[in-house]
């Protein structure tokens, strides 16, 4: 087998969560890929995880302990790991998404992570400059008018997932937010509009900026359109994540005003690795295997 890859649940290690590590029932799933590798013996192992894993504490309450244990377990079954935190925007994806990638090979590890191709526009002044970051506004442009608001929790009639599910009260709140800003920063507004928000809530009621990459798409919140007073649709999420227009999602499309029990379409996108980045890493691994005649 050439490649074993996986992305175990991130909630146990995410800096946005409770960071319970292995005390969360999902945390030990991190080590399942090692159990599979010991049996299957692939030539290469690829793991994706949030960068919070790098600092997650273990039984000894020491920062980074869980990741060190993970690397040691890989080495104990004959693999040499390399790892890197990769910013999706550095590879032409219009999203400031950082994720940890581990590539482990049997024996000596000669794998080289791909070099970035894009950089912030203010750094594009050198003679051999990289391409400027792609913007969220550019990739969501051209989808046409948003679909009418969908009432109810699971009913929708657009197979392309370009569906607007914004509650009216949320439209009122985000209408007060300038492009590229967020609601809790609008301290001049009354408490009624900013109710329940603290200064740390920088991603809740966030309006994207047309000329910049999006913030990291998240499961519990839906960002707002740069110029329209509505949530981004799942199709717009897919464009920001790098999915082709031909790709279709299944499942409910829900707002964020109630409990979301099932894996709805916004969450499906936010939980996934951006396809262009997956392709870049896969191509690099294939090149390594060919060069090593493995």
Image (spheres, rainbow, N blue to C red):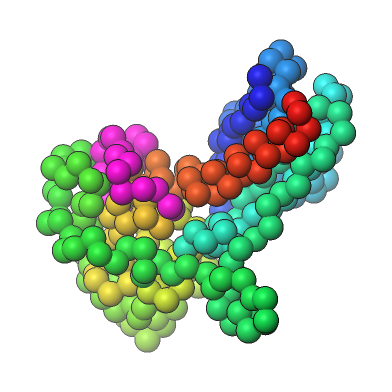
Q: Is residue 25 visible?
A: yes
Tell me where the magenta segment starts and ends, as one range.
241-264
Q: Is residue 127 above or below residue 91?
A: below
Residue found 28% across the figure and 35% down from its top: 251
Q: Nearer the viewer, residue 182 or 5?
A: 5
Residue 247 included in the magenta stretch of the image: yes
Near-viewer residue (167 or 47): 47
Predominant secondary structure in magenta? loop
Q: Residue at x 61, y 50 (%)?
A: 99
Q: Is residue 274 left or right of residue 171?
A: right
The quadrant in which the N terminus is found is top right
Residue 176 position (above or below residue 82)? below
**Left or right of residue 200: residue 197:** left
Place residue 211 in its image quadrant: bottom left
Q: Residue at x 31, y 38 (%)?
A: 249
Residue 40 percent across, percent down from the top left: 69, 15
Pinpoint residue 267: horizontal percent, then vertical percent: 40, 44
Expressed as whole percent of the image width and height from the top left, the position of residue 241 reads: 44, 53
In the image, residue 276 lies at what x, y percent?
Answer: 50, 49
Relative to 154, say whether 123 is above or below. Answer: below
Q: Is residue 61 visible?
A: no
Which residue sits at x=20%, y=41%? 159
Instruction: Please indicate whether residue 14 sits to the left or right of residue 185 in the image.
Output: right
Asked whether 75 falls inside the magenta stretch, the response is no
Q: Which image quarter holds the C terminus?
A: top right
Q: How many marks?
A: 0
């Amino acid at each position: 087998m050439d490649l074993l890859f996986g992305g175990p649940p991130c909630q146990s290690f995410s800096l946005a969560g409770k960071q319970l590590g292995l005390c969360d029932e999902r945390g030990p799933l991190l080590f399942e890929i090692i159990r599979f590798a010991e049996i299957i013996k692939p030539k290469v192992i690829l793991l994706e995880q949030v960068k919070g894993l790098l600092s997650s504490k273990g039984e000894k309450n020491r920062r980074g302990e869980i990741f060190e244990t993970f690397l040691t377990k890989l080495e104990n079954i004959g693999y040499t790991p390399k790892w890197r935190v990769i910013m999706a925007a550095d590879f032409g994806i219009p999203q400031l998404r950082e994720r940890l990638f581990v590539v482990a090979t049997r024996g000596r590890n000669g794998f080289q992570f791909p070099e970035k191709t894009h950089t912030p526009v203010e750094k594009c002044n050198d003679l051999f400059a990289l391409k400027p970051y792609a913007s969220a506004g550019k990739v969501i442009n051209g989808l046409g008018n948003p679909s009418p608001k969908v009432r109810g929790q699971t009913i929708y009639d657009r197979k392309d997932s370009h569906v607007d599910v914004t509650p009216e009260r949320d439209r009122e709140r985000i209408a007060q937010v300038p492009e590229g800003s967020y609601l809790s920063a609008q301290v001049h507004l009354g408490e009624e509009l900013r109710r329940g928000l603290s200064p740390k809530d920088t991603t809740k009621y966030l309006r994207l900026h047309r000329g910049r990459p999006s913030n990291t798409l998240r499961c519990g919140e839906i960002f707002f359109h740069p110029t329209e007073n509505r949530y981004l649709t799942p199709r717009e999420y897919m464009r920001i994540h790098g999915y082709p227009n031909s790709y279709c999602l299944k499942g409910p499309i829900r707002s964020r005003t109630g409990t979301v029990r099932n894996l709805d379409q916004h969450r499906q996108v936010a939980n996934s690795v951006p396809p262009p980045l997956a392709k870049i890493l896969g191509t690099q691994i294939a090149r390594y295997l060919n060069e090593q005649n493995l």
